Amino acid sequence: MQQNKSQQILKMLNQVNWVYRILFWVIIAFFGLIVVENFIKDLTNGIITLIISIFIALFLIKLVFGIINLTYANLQYTRCLKLMNKQLRESGISTTLSQQSKVPPSLFAIDTINKLLFINNQQTDYEPLIFDKEKLISAKVERESTVHTTTKHKGSVAVFGSSFGYNFGSKSTSTSHITETAFLELQYLTEQKTSLTLVIPYGGNRRGAEEALNTIQQF
């Protein structure tokens, strides 16, 4: 039996999750065996090995996950979006505005001609959801700000006889920047007569979220 597009999307996303899990536990198991072996030989050596292994394992996990994000996961997310866009075309929606994000895959479209909204994301289990203005309870744009701070310490390298040393300076500089993320929140009435809030991510495109909100309010 051939899988429908929604099932294919879920399958691809599950495959990505399994790759992450398998690689994570392979790294943990590898360093776990090394630590256990050293603990059996000597307690002090085992503790030192444990501390070193934690840092190396965390570095490897970050490195491997970063590579997966840029390669396999990126390819799977792109395939998911292609299927979702195909579902959008097959739905008969006349797209006026649309918004899509890759991680996690999400697709949103507005049809001003027929006054319809199309949503396909995690919240809909990747089943296309289409509803008209009569079922729309409210719509608003929410913003989330995150402050990122980077601190740099100044010091110098000095030569003492035949050895090297590092002089820690008392000066340090901190640089902060704010990252703003915008979301379009839609509250709609389900078939069971209950309200459900759907979140459409717009990333740093706040104007895009506000444009979508203004378009919906003109229904």
Image (spheres, helix red, strand yellow):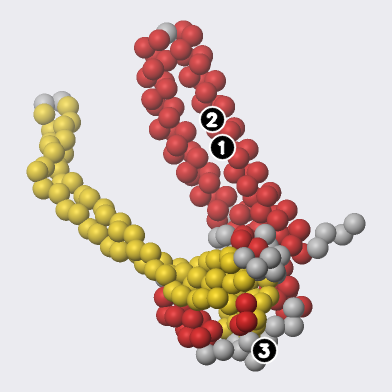
Q: Is residue 142 above or below residue 51?
A: below
Q: CA distance from mark 3 to mark 1?
A: 47 Å
Residue that mark 2 sits on: 28
Where, quadrant-wise, is the C terminus in this rendering?
Answer: bottom right
Q: Is residue 76 above or below residue 170?
A: below
Residue 161 at x, y percent in the picture: 11, 26
- Disc 1 vs disc 2: Cβ atoms closer than 8 Å? yes
Residue that mark 1 sits on: 24
The answer to which quarter of the image holds residue 121 is bottom right
Residue that mark 3 sits on: 114
Q: Is residue 75 above or below residue 31?
A: below
Residue 184 at x, y percent in the picture: 49, 72
Mark 1 secondary-structure assignment: helix
Q: CA distance from mark 1 to mark 2?
A: 6 Å
First in sequence, mark 3 or 2: give its number. 2
Question: Which amino acid type is shown beneath numbered disc 3?
Answer: Asn
Question: Which amino acid type is shown beneath numbered disc 1?
Answer: Phe
Foreground residue among 76 and 6: 6
For label 1, the crowd category at 10 Å Cα-Cα, with few meaning under 14, some 14 to 19 and many 20 or more, is some
Residue sitting at 65 percent across and 68 percent down?
193
The answer to which quarter of the image holds residue 210 is bottom left
The answer to which quarter of the image holds residue 170 is top left
In the rendered image, the residue lying farthest to the right is 1
Question: Which amino acid type is shown beneath numbered disc 2?
Answer: Ile
Left/right of residue 23 with respect to residue 4 in the rendered view:
left
Residue sitting at 57 percent across and 60 percent down?
104
Mark 3 secondary-structure assignment: loop
